[in-house]
Every structure is written in C-alpha cells, then in structure tokens.
Amino acid sequence: MQDLLELAVSATASGCIYGLIALAYLLMIRPTGIINFAVGEWAMVASFGGFIFLTKYEWPYPLGMAAVVAVMILVGWATERIAVRPLVEKGAPLLAPILALLGVLVVTREIISVSFPPDPLPVPFPFGIGRIEIGPIGGSYQSFFIIAVTLAVFAGTWFFFEKTLWGKSFEAVSLNRRAAALMGINLSRVTALSFAGGAGAAGLAGLLVSPNISAHYLMGVPLAIQGFTALVVGGVGRVEGALLGGLLLAFAEQFIARYAPIPSGYTQGVPLLFLMVFLLVRPTGLLRARA
Amino acid sequence: MKRLAWIGGFVILAVLPFFLGSYHNDVYRKMLLWVTLALGYNFLFGICGQVAFSHFAFYGIGAYSVVILLFQLGLPLPVAIVLGVVICVVLALVVAIPATRLEGFYLALVTLALAQLFIVVLNEGGNVTGGTGGIANYRLPPIFGWRIAGPAYTVVIVALLAGTLAVLWRLDHSWFGRACRAVRDNPEAAAAMGVDVARTKVIVFTLTSALAGIAGMVYAFVDNTVNPPIFGLENAFLILFMVIVGGAGRHAGAVIGAILLFLLPFWLSPLVGHHHQLVFGALVVAAILLQPKGLIGLWDRFSR
Amino acid sequence: MVRMWGLLACALLIGAADAQTIKIGVITDRVGVSKPYSEPATEGVIFGADEINRRGGLLGRKIELLVEDDQSRPDISAALARKLVEQGAVFILSVSLSPATQQQQTVTMEAKTPQMTPMNSADYLTTQLDNPYFWQTGPLGSVQIATLLAHAKTKNFKRVALITDNSDLGQAIAKAFKGTLEKAGIQIVAEEVVARGATTAMPQMQKLRAANPEAMFLAGVLTAENVLIFRAYKELGVKFPIHSSYNLSVPIYETVAKGLINGITFVDAYDPDKPEVKAFEAAYRKATGKDPQNLHGYGYDGIMLIADAIRRAGSTDKEKIREAMQKTNYAGVMGKKGMKYSFPEGKRAGFDPDGMVVRVYEKDRQGRVLHVGSK
C-alpha cells in the first residue's frame, strides 16, 4: 500500500510534466492549428537556462526561474516571428509551418549541442533533496513542487481562457479565424502570444523536470512525444484535458511498469500501444470541447 | 522517343557503379535507396495527403523479414522474398484499415507509435531479431550459381528504383492518381464524386508500405547487417524533410529532395566540422520558408 | 656529376618518403547519441597522434589522422569506412557506437583493412563476425562482471537484482552480466529496464525493492537514466549495495549525481596510481591545459597500440600490420598496474580479463581501488 501511494505521487509529478508540455502544444494548436513539435527542444533550452542561471551563476531560485521563463517567452515569440509568420502571411498550407518548426527543432538542438559540453549538466532543486510526508502520502520535495507549480499554471490558464477578454479572443480565433479577424481581433498578436505562452509552459516543464534528469541535449524528443500523447489522450478541446491526459499517461506507464507481470523491456511498448488503441477508439480525446 | 530517353537514363544509372570506386558506389547505392523510399513516401504524403511516420519502419520490417526468413528459418530465396512482401502487406493492412478511419493527423500518430513499437520489438526480440546487436554475418545466397555483389548489386538497386517509379508513375497517371489527389484536397468532395475515400487510403498506404518493405529487403544485402539503430525514428523525419524540401506531390521533387538531403551531410561535414547538423537544420527551415512548394518550385520558375 | 645527381635523387626520395604520411582513419560521432563518449576518446587519439609526430613520427613518417563523423548512423558509418579505405588508411579506429563499429566490420573484412575499437565493450563485436582484421581493446561486458563478482565474492551473494536501460550497449552489458551471474549460481530475483527519456525510475526501483535482493548490479550506460535510478534508490531508502559497470567511471557522475553515489562500487580500467596514468595525465595537461578523463585514455591507448603494431610490422603493408597486431604485447594507460594488451590464441578481444579494478565512490569523488583483477 505504501508502494502504491508513493508511486501515485511520482506518477502525478511525471503526469504534471507531460501535462505542461501538452498545454504548450494546446496553446499553439487552438488559435492556429499548428502542431509545434519543437516544444521538447524548448523544454531542453529552459533546462540549460536553468543550468546557466542557477548552477553556474548561482542566482536565487525564484529569480533564476523567472529569468528562464522570461527567456523562453522571448524564444517562443522569436520562433513565431521567424518560422511561422512569414508562412502564414504567404498563405502557405498548414503543413508548412509544422514542417518549418521541425527544422527549428533540429536547429535548436544543435545550437545547444555545440554550445555546451556533451555531458549532462546539473540543475539544482529549489528545495533540495528531501521528503515530505502528508499523512500516508509521501514524496520528494521536488515532486510536490512540480505538482504545485503545474496546478498554478493550469489554474491561471483556465482563468485566462474563461474570464479574461484576451482569453475569449483566443477562443474566438480558434473557432473561426476569419470571423475573429472581422471582429477586430489582431490575429498575429494572438498567434505571437500563443507561441510565447507555449514556450513558457514548455520551458517550465523543462526546468521542473531537469533537476531529476539533468540537462542534456537529447532530452527534447522523448518529452515532445510524451507530451503529444498526453494531448491526444486528453483532447485538444479543453485546457484541463492536457493535464488529465498527462496524468493518465504517467499513471499507465508507471503502474504498468510496477505491477504488470511482463518483462521490463516490454513496458516501454505500453504507452505506445495505449496511444494506438486510444486513437482508434476515441481519437478526439477524453474531454470534449465545450459546445 | 520519350520511353527511349527513360530507358537510356536508367541504363546510364546502372552502368555508372562500374566506374565508381568502392566508397562512391556505396554512397551512390544508398542514395538510390533513399530516392526509392522518397518516391513511395511522396505518393503517400504528397499525392494522397496522408501523413505517416511508418514508412521507414516498413523498410526495416522488409529488411529484417527477409534476413530472418532466409537465415533463421532457412527458406529458399524466392520464398523468402514473397513471404517478406506478404508480411509487409498484412502488417500495412492491419494498421491501415482501422487507422484510415481517423482524421489525417491521427494516422500520423498511430504510425509514429508503430515505428517506435517496431524498435522496441527489435530490441526485445532475443534470438529471433538478434536483439540490440542485430543480425550480421550473412550474405546474399547465390542466384543461379552467381553471387551478386558490389557494383553488380547496385544494378539490382537501380532496377528496384525503376520498378518503383514505374508503378507509381502509372498509378499517378490513372484515375486512381486523380482519386488520391481528390482525397488529399477535399475528402468530402471526393466522396460526393463517388470515390471510396477509405478504400483509397488503405490501398495507398498498403501499397507504399509494401514498396518500402521491398526496398528494405534489397537494403539488407547492402551492408549485410541489420540492427535497430539503422531503422531509428530520426529517419522517418528525414524522409518527410526530403519530400517537403524537394516538393511534395511531384516525383521529381522527391528525387531532388532525397538526393540533396542524403548527400548534404557528406558535403557539409568536411566544410563545417561538427556544426553540419546545425547547417542542415537551418537549410531545411530556409527551404520551407522561401519555397513552401519545395525546391521543385525553383526548377519550374527557371525552366519557364 | 653522377654522384651529385645520385645524392639529389636520394634527397628527393627521402623528402618524398617523409612527405608521405601514414594515414590512420578515425570514425567518431560528433553530433549523435555517442558524442559524450566519442568526443573525449577522439581528443585522446588526436593527442596521442600529435605526441608521436612530435617525437619523430612512425617509421620516419608522420601520422595523418583522417577523422570522419558518422552521426551515430550505422549505414553512413559503413560508407565512411569505405571512404577511409579508398583514401589509403592503413588502420581504422572506431570510436562511435557498437552497432556502427559492427557495420564498419563488414567493410573492413571485405577490404582486408585492419580495424580496432579501443572503447566499445559489447561482447558480440568479436563473436558475431569472423573478421581477422578486427580487434577490440575495450573492456568487455563479461570482463566487467567477472571483476565485479570477484570483488563481491566475499559477500557471498545468492539473490541479486539487475537493472539497465534500453540502449544497445546497456542491453549488451546486461546480457553479459546476466550470463556470468547465472553461471556463478547466483539467482537474479529482479530484472528491470529504464527507458531512455523516462522521467523517473520509481516503478522499477519499487519492483526491485519488493523482490528483496542482496545487491543490485547496474548495467546501464545512459547518464540521465542512471541518475534517475540513483534518485529513486535514495527516495525509497533502500540499502542494498550497488555494483556498476564501467560506465560509472566517467567523471560526469561526480557533478550530476552529487550526493547520490557514495558507496557505489564500479569497475574501471583506469588506476590513478599507475605510473603510466600519471605520466599521461601530466603530458595531456601540459599539451592542452585541460585535465583528461579516463575516456581520453581509451583513445590514447588506441592510437598507441596501432603505432606499436606498425612499428613492429616495419611497414604499412596491411597484412604485415595484421600479423603484428595479433602479436601485440603492450602496456598502455588503461588497465590495472602491469596489465598488457594482448591477443592470445588468435582471439581478437585484447583487454586482459584480469585487468580491471574495482573502485568505490567516496565523498562524491572516485575513490580508492578496492580490488584488482577478476580472481
């Protein structure tokens, strides 16, 4: 029983990371329809940023974290400007920016790869390595920190979409671009904001997960795939879907690895089979968009 | 007259390896294989509009199948080849039939998962697949007492390329090709015009995957080794890049894209050292930004 | 008059011979998954070649290194091997992935060109193909587990756990570990795999804990995933000892796994007290201003072994080099004190099975040698 609760905490923390990446995808897909696989590399850039600000220059954690998020917002905005806007303005088919962003994925990874030594680099824990016990539930400081930050981000995002004017304009754009433009909503500003927000979310995910896995240049692609799986499971329609999808994926991965009586090597195949079955049975995801 | 030109062209391609050194022959034949793959993928993605990441996995399935059938099970070569094709077709159908019910991008996801699952199966396959070390130490069995190797084998690859192109070309210039394009551009309109959209998608997916599998069977005897890293996921993206950069929907585009992106690392590496991946990525982004229709668009512009 | 022309001709010939370098090919990975290991090894090779050239070269000629990047893509690797052969390389050093090395073997076997990997430790490299032109001087997975077991013999383990990752080398080493452990009559009560890209190793570690092993053998080679294993180990508060493959001898763990590794024993081929090691470190520091790691030592030994073989062969004829290489008896930087690389009875794996040491991490640094050899 103890194992189960402990695993639940670990799975929740991992699920939050996947959820944040899924949120990053979602923020960009909703208004533009563009699937940006470079979110994994964004997470990686943020973790290297964490290494620079927090390990190398030893800034206090809140300051370093804010700096990383600020840098990522800039990176997101720049990516949109360079790789997306020219294509949208030219009227290129939807596939073009998606592919351009795949190219950005390679460029980003290589810039990091040549700028840093090849070994993984350490990123510090904000609260050190320790355990908290809340009643029967126990986990590391970092796990709870991840959960807390993720909940805050999702709450903020939900609030943004539901209650603020900006959020409503996002919704309008995702429902009908032309109508939204006709109503005076600045399409390119919404797009730029969505990319900046997406980069911020992905960056947070990278920063939160990197103390555990350290910052290394190959961490991007696995995160991008896991995040996308979470998005598909949860559905693109609702923000909460991203978090739900992430949690489901992480729980499935970890509980099957722990309890299923199959050889350990095959457990890697589980999330893939999960995804395939899910797609065939419920492709729109678990949570439907609100009508 | 035109047909003579085509035949002449392929004869030149087939004779060329006999004049190349061992290294250039190796690069040449691998390039031809990538061109073959790109042509098939272009039909699936460029002409029929299906985004899939399993193309390279079927290349691997073909390669591993023929090796396992020939050397683990000891079947004679013709049987192994036919059985290998059957395996690819069956697997493609198993994936295609349910997957083509899904919206475009979901096919991409399922095939992405399939590609990853393939690698997992290879790694965990124990003695059947050789596990993480793969299978080596085999050679193409003699055909009619004659061992085909070196430049002579490149002729086989040229024949494969010619065959693939012939099949795809014929299909493209038939009503089936038009149906595919209709499915790509507007599935509802296509259905309204009487095209069975689901069946078209299944046929295209199965056919191109089988062609990729056949190419894989040919590849198995190029380096005489098959192991999981050869068939990794990055290659699926590379094929996509090739078709996009070259020009999706046009056979010539696939050829240009494949040749360019395959040879690019060889050229860049001595020039820019270990920054060549970076230059590669930047070139891909630039190509898409400047010419979303692919490099073939440039060719069109200049030949006007 | 004739004498003058004769002298001139001689001078020209000597000059030409001098200008003719000995070409040695190096296939490395500069951008892919093998980069963290290939990069330092290549630096060691370059340092060794420079050192040889500074001291007058090889057979009176300078060594010219032809370095190619295979991006960890095995099919490109094979093409590059052909390129090197065509460019006149008399020996090829493989410092990329094990599958890439294997792919290159099909070429070197055909082209009858000597090839060596100073670092790969996969056992299958010398067993899968019968290539008389290929040698492997990296410490085999089977050697590593034998050394670890020899050290652990006093503890008399009966039930142990095995954990690794899903990389090809991690799987190969785990296979070697498993075979030797089972042959020694030790029961493996749990066998777990942590996949590349995982965010935690908690499920695997919980499963291990539930099986209650007396010790855990670590065969994984991916740094990030190994760190996850150590974290889960610590978080779960388990206490069984950890014995690791030579992967933990890479110094990066001192930074990324600080506070997690004290007490972990690992096999290493690098004995810091060995006089050759001290000389190597001093020379490297002097030449480049940086401190070398053990990975540099593998590369350095690689080029030195080749140079030694060519010297004994007395020529750059590939057949003569092959014979000379097979007769190698050379003391390098890696290995325990007094170890020599040799290829007895036509074998092609040259790292002395008795040549590794077991060390332990103390105070977050690679500490003392606990055990030498595999007896």
Image (spheres, grey):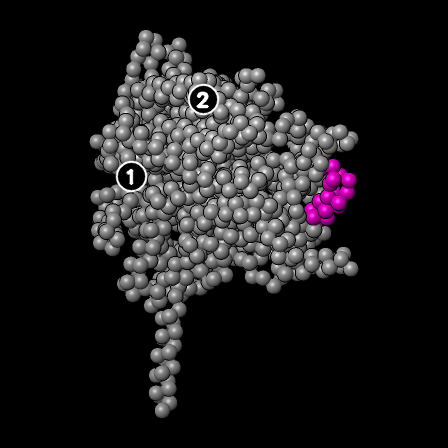
Determine whether the residue tagged by mark 1 lies in a helix, strand or loop: loop
Q: Are marks 2 and 1 in contact (CB under 8 Å)?
A: no
Give the label, 2 or 1, closer to the camera: 2
| Quarter of the C terminus of chain C within the rendering | top left
Q: Position of residue C56 (x, y in %)?
A: 29, 65
Determine if residue C104 is in view: no
Q: Quadrant of residue A74?
A: top left
Residue lying at the far top in this picture: please name it: A135
Q: Position of residue B201 (x, y in %)?
A: 69, 33
Most foreground residue, A95 or A243: A95
Placement of C319 over or under A144, stated as above or below: below
Q: Position of residue A40 (x, y in %)?
A: 44, 33
Crowdedness near tag 2: few (<14), some (14–19) or many (≥20) residues, C-alpha within 10 Å: few
- In this rendering, position of residue B238 left or right of residue C367: right
Image mark for residue A165: 2
Residue A112 sits inside the magenta stretch: no
Residue depicted at 31% across the width and 29% down the height: A65
Most foreground residue, B183 or C113: B183
Most foreground residue, C177 or B117: B117
- The residue that label 1 is drawn on is C251
The magenta segment: B163-180
Q: Quadrant of residue C320?
A: bottom left
The mark total stands at 2
Residue depicted at 41% across the width and 50% down the height: B274
Placement of A194 over or under C17, stated as above or below: above
- Residue under mark 1: which chain is it in? C
Same-chain status of marks 2 and 1: no
Most prominent secondary structure in the magenta stretch?
helix
Most foreground residue, C275 or B1: B1
